[in-house]
Structure formats: C-alpha cells, structure tokens
Image (tube, rainbow, N blue to C red):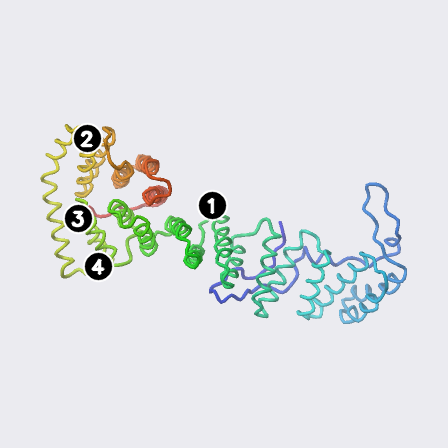
Amino acid sequence: MTARISGSNRLATLGIALALAFALPAIAVAQYQQPAPSRQQAGEAKGKEGEEPKSEYSKEFRKLAAKVQTAVNDKKWPEVLAGLPELEALPSQTRDEQKAIATWRLQATQGVGDQDAFAAAIESFLAEGFADPENVGAMHRQLAAHYSAKQDKEKTLLHFQQFVDATPDAQPDEYETLGRLHLQANHFQEAAQYLGKAIETSASKNEKPKEMWFQLRDRCFIEMKDDAGRVANLESLVGYYPDKEYYSRIVAIYQAQSQDDRIVMLNAYRLAVSDPQGGLATVGGYLNYADTALVAGSPGEAARALERGMKDGIVPSAGTNQQTLAEARNAVAQDKKSLPAESAAAAKNAKGEVDVKVGLGFYSTGEFEKAVEATRRGIAKGGVARLDDANLLLGASLLELGRRDEARAAFDAAAAAAAEGSPMKRIAGLWVIRVTRSETTTEPAPAAG
C-alpha cells in the first residue's frame, strides 16, 4: 500500500486549504537515508550475472562525500548543505553521484526546516526520476501540502492530481479532495469524475457515501448543463439520503423530461410523498400532486398529499387548501361505496384496463389488498394500455402491505415495460431502491387518508 502523509483530507468548504503535515512518510525517508558511497561500492564493473549492478562513484566524489556523509550521520544539516556545491561542481557525474547529492539535499533541507528549499528538492528528485515508484505518490502529496499552505491553488491541484494518479488504492476522502480542488478551479467534468470515484469507492467498501459528495456533484452537473448526469446523481443520492429537497429536484427533472405527462407525474409524486422519509419541499409540489391525483381519479392520493404537506408545515392548513382537502375526502367516501360494484363489473370485463382503473380506485381509498387483487387481475387479462404504470401501481400497493419481494418483482416488471431511459423506467428503479432501503429499516406506512 502506498504511504500516506498524515493530515486532514476533508475540506469543509470550497475555499480549499489542505491541511497536510509537512513531513516525509517513513517509506520515503528510508529511500534517501542511504549510507555514504564506500570504497566497496565504488568501481565501474558490473556484478555477476543475476546480481544488481554496483553503484558507480569516482575517487574524487568519494573523497569529498566522506565529509558530507559524516555531517549527515551527525545531523549537522547546515554543514551538509555547505558541502553539496563542491560535489555538484565535479565534472561528469555518474547517475549514482547525482542521486546521492539529491538525497542529501532532501535530508538537509528537511532537517533545517527550510520548507521552500525542501519542496524544491522534492520536485527536483521527482523530475530526475530518483524516487522509487512506491514513493512517487507520497512525494507529490507532500508538494500538494506545501503549495496549499502557500495558497498556490494551481500547483496544489497539479501535485494532488499526480498523487492520486500514482496511488492505485486511493481512498474516498482523497478522491473527494481532488474533486474539490477541480471544482475550485472550475474543472466541473473532472470534479464530477473524482467525486463519483469517492462515491463508488466508498460503496464498494460497503460504506455509506457522504451526502456532501452527491451535493457537490449536483453543482457540477448544473454547471455542465448535464441533466442526464444530474438526475442519475440525484437518484443515487435519494437512495442513501431520502429527503424532500432531493425528491423535489428529481420530480422537477421528470416533469421537464416528460413535458408534464400526467401518468409520469402521478407516479413521480406518489413515489416521493409515500416515502415516510421523503416528501416534497414546496407548497406547489403538494398542490400539483393533489391536482394530478384528482384528475387521474385518485382523490385519496390528493387527500394524503395535502395531509402530508400540512403535517410537515409546508402546505398552509387554511383557506382553499382545506376546501380541496374536504372535497377529496368526500370523493374518497363516495368511491368506497361505489368501488365494490365497479370491481365486480370489471372482473367480468374482458379488458384488463378496466381492472387496473379499479385497482387505482382501491389504492386511492387505502384498500391496498383489493388494489393488488384488481390490478393483478387486469395485468393478467392483458389489454392494459400502460403496463409500466399498472405494475408501478401494483408494486406501490404491495409495498404498503409490507410484501417487499412481490413489490420488487412488480417494479422490475414496470422497468421492463418502460421505454429505455424514460422517467417511468427511472421511477421504477427508485422504487426498487426504496424497497432495498426498507428491508434494512423499519418504515412506517403513510396514513391511508
């Protein structure tokens, strides 16, 4: 595993200031704490076949280097720095001699605490290719810390990018840091990419990705005007963090994509408001749901929408809202009286569409067992105009009854019946996510109304 440098990897705001420790990790330090070139190491001959080639140092270099190595051993760093120019002045230096000088410069500049000189020494060490592969990432991260402290955003990003590129096992918080640095530089595509890697890596470890990662990605997709990327990110976000604000954003996108299609919107609103942890964030959202449900012949959904909005303190519980709620409740009472006869007639009808409409009526009145029976009967008969809509209704009814496996199968069937990439297919996918979430939590059913 590549060495890490201790320090904060998480950035609280977009005004980024990396707080990374300015000290080389042990794995990198070991690389440059090499012994002085000895007479035994000297010599230009190669070792025997299969052995590593011996280091090459000239007599002149060994003579001058002995004093520098003594100072290194005694940690007399100013003396080490004072001795390096004479070594550097030697003509025709070998690669080993150049690396020894670069190594001592790293040790000495770190030892005297000259951060600028130390950073320059690291950059030179990397540029010359002296760093062992396993230390390259750690050294770039060291440089990112240095330039962050100096508020050099461009070089901070440059070296943190190189750190991540050189680190096969980069961690979620490191991807987050890189994503934030790109976002700060208005590199929205790259920011979305690395925030996505933070999410994916965290999920692959069976950890819950941070809510902020999705929020920052949302900003990226808005800036890029990438609606497809944005809705996919929001759908993933609401799976982990069901919230009325996120549901409202998703519903708004579905509304635009479907051109306010009535069937799409009824299903989108139903998904959001039936989720006890979800809901809608605006008065307009709840009122639109109520209107859509009333037009579709589901007054019970209209009543539940208004009741939820009032309970959450979003819909004012006065004036025309109370009047609409009263009208919806009256319609529900009437439907409860008429539905038994309508269900019996639908059962004799050859067209499955009639049964599905009765199923919607029972879903409206909160009689979910009867809704399941009628809707399944209609689907089995065939002749249903919108199989995706019918299966979503079936799944929603089953989930209200706590029959999760059956609900999941219905949502899968809805997804299979929906057009590829359509809002209905995406709504089915979100229902599946909710079923999965409800399997690990106790989810109270919303009031039937």
Report, in whole angstroms, how far the alpha carbon at label 3 lies from the one at label 1.
42 Å
Q: Residue at left 64%, top 63%?
A: 23
Q: Report the residue marked by disc 2.
A: 351
Q: CA distance from mark 1 to mark 4?
A: 38 Å
Task: Using a 10 Å C-alpha cutoff, classify the residue at mark 4 as few (fewer than 14 neighbours), some (14 to 19) or many (20 or more).
Answer: many
- SS assignment at label 2: loop
Q: Which-is-in-front pick, marks 1 and 4? A: 4
Query: With respect to residue 16, does 400 lie above or below?
Result: above
- Name the residue carrying label 1: 206
Task: Name the amino acid type tagged 1.
Answer: Asn
First in sequence: mark 2 or mark 1?
Answer: 1
Q: Real-space Cα distance between discs 2 and 1?
A: 47 Å
The answer to which of 237 and 390 lies nearer the viewer is 390
Q: Earlier in the sequence, mark 4 or mark 3?
A: 3
Residue 288 visible from this viewpoint: yes
Amino acid type, callout 3: Leu
Residue type pointed to by label 2: Lys
User: Vertically, is 27 above or below 357?
Assistant: below
Q: Label 2 vs label 3: CA separation?
A: 24 Å
Tell me the crowding category of disc 2: few under 14, some 14 to 19, or many 20 or more residues within 10 angstroms, Cα based.
some
Quarter holding residue 117:
bottom right
Viewer-nearest of discs 2 and 3: 2
**Which is in the foreground here, disc 3 or disc 1?**
3
Q: Secondary structure at mark 4?
A: loop
Question: Which badge, 2 or 4, is on the more N-terminal residue?
Answer: 4
Q: Mark 4 highlights which residue?
A: 315
Mark 1 or mark 4: whose residue is earlier in sequence:
1
Please say if the residues under marks 4 and 3 sit with CB atoms less than 8 Å apart: no
